[in-house]
Amino acid sequence: MPPTLASLVHHSALKLTVRAGEDRLDVPVRWAHVSELADPVPYMEGGELLLITALKLDAENPEVMRRYVKRLAGAGVVGLGFAVGVNYEEIPEALVDAADKEGLPLLEVPRRTPFLAISKAVSAAIAADQYRAVTAGFAAQRELTKQALGGGAEGLLTALAGQVDGWAALYDASGAVVATAPEWAGRRAARLTPDVERLRERPAPASAVVGAPDNEDRVELHSLGTGRRPRAALAVGTAAALGTAERYAVHSAIALLTLTTERSRSLHAAEQRIGAAVLRMLLAGESDHARAVAGDLYGALLDAPFRLILAESASASAARAHADGHARVAPTKRSPAAVAVPETNGDPLGGLAEIVESAAARSGESVLLVPDGERLVVLAVDGGAAVAACGEYAAALEAARAATREQPVTDEDELVVGLSAPAGPIAAGAAYKQAEQALSVARRRGRFLVEHEELAAGSVLPLLADDAVRAFADGLLRALHEHDATGRGDLVASLRAWLSRHGQWDAAAADLGVHRHTLRYRMRRVEEILGRSLDDPDVRMELWLALKTTAAAGE
């Protein structure tokens, strides 16, 4: 504890006597300062014990003393020491009354006690308090290190909560609570997730103090990690501001957790290299070798059906679509407050990787992530938390895009994801092709995520909804439209009716309200104009797709 007025009064060598403010002696003293100025307030910082002899003060004037004492109290001076036997044989009543009315402790300093002795006593007590804090800090560091080595992050949080007489929580990169100590703090820590997410937007290291509602507690948030993106966050909740010893303990915990985080990052890089080797073997059809290399790390993933997720940034997807000659739906606009979407800081693949990894870690699932240039390849348990998190993330992005459109969505913040059907190790190559096909469709439709199963369940027509197919359809049917425009017959409608009836003359003629011989004549005219035979199934297929494409376009 820092020195207080009470500890100075009880100091046997100082012989101080309390003349006013007896009920406020427990206030800490930051320093002892001597000043004979009539107004020393401009040179005060607050927390001082001011020592005077009233050399330049009219200490017997009640009005002067009232203003003097009021100024001192307003400046945060915690006490006034008056030396008797120098300029005044005793403390003037005007000063005693003013101090008593203002509630400012007034100490009588005997002539035989020099101000230097009081300053030394305060300085020695402050030094002793700082030494105790440093010693306690080193002891806390040793205990936290011991707990970190023996009990991991959970043991460290338990020790830290005891050191600060409060609670502590650890968050992962996505802002989800990983561990708390004591256990009752879990609900409190969960309410701080939005604050942790805002902290992640700032460059590391970053910290913030969060005021709790209803004076519940005071919480400090600290980001963990040395990279551009924080890898985790620490929350420390206490009833009051941290003291010096508690501050040492918190800083030690931050250092230890950062070391753990960086060590985990190195291990994660090694795991990714193993995962890349496993993926290459699976795609090469060497499932047995892949299992041997996967070992305990990814073995459980290969023992159950998995999904292959293929993701790339929207900018890379747009470039690929341009190279392939396909049109891509342009990004729309979204309101910044429409839907809460995790910030990607210009790295959408990294953001998706964090979300998938965090979801898998919380549920105890194995997940394999392999960065592949501008793509990210993920193997995740079918029906598991990682696949669900990917879908929820894409749904949030879709909802944000569909919301009120005020601000443009840039390609740097968007993803395109393809998801395969459930597969096993033997069918990994086929799953990769399925994910690529789904990714291609998502790219061409302007979607964030498409599952391969959607392609088989839906119609083939949306897959053809691009400019190249539209141009083909318009070119194929142009001559028929030009014929009909002259009023010489409705060949396009007749062709549509005949194809929809699978070439059945009577049924198609009935739909059109004409005689079947009239319909036969029109179909011969179609063949003459197009120079193609309707007996050829390929021709009939192309004409039907052309008709469906133009119908979908509203033509």
Image (spheres, rainbow, N blue to C red):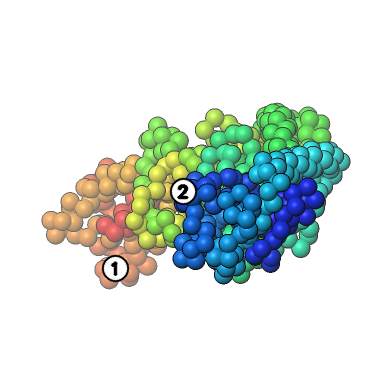
Q: Amino acid at mark 2?
A: Pro
In the depicted structure, whether residue 273 falls above or below residue 77: above
Residue farthest left in this picture: 486
In the depicted structure, whether residue 487 falls above or below residue 222: below
In front of the other: label 1 or label 2? 2
Coordinates of residue 44 in the picture (x, y in percent): 52, 48
Q: Please give left or right for residue 102 compared with residue 134 in the image.
A: left
Q: Residue at 62% of width from left, 34% of height from top?
A: 226
Q: Residue at 76% of width from left, 63% of height from top?
A: 184
Q: Residue at 64% of width from left, 37% of height from top?
A: 225
Coordinates of residue 533 in the picture (x, y in percent): 33, 45
Say whether residue 99 is visible: no
In the depicted structure, whether residue 501 falls above or below residue 352: below
Coordinates of residue 251 in the picture (x, y in percent): 69, 41
Residue farthest right in this picture: 150
Frontmost residue, 499 versus 55: 55
Q: Amino acid at mark 1?
A: Leu
Q: Quadrant of the C terminus?
A: bottom left
* SS under mark 1: helix
Coordinates of residue 114 in the picture (x, y in percent): 68, 43
Frontmost residue, 200 versus 133: 133
Frontmost residue, 67 versus 367: 67
Q: Earlier in the sequence, mark 1 or mark 2?
A: 2
* Crowding near the residue tagged with mark 1, few <14, some 14–19, many ≥20 C-alpha atoms within 10 Å: some
Q: Which residue is mark 2?
A: 42
Q: Residue at 72% of width from left, 34% of height from top?
A: 259
Label disc, if present, on residue 512 of the rendered structure = 1
* Crowding near the residue tagged with mark 2, few <14, some 14–19, many ≥20 C-alpha atoms within 10 Å: few
Q: Please give left or right for residue 60 compared with residue 10 in the image.
A: left
Q: CA distance from mark 1 to mark 2?
A: 100 Å
Frontmost residue, 541 versus 252: 252
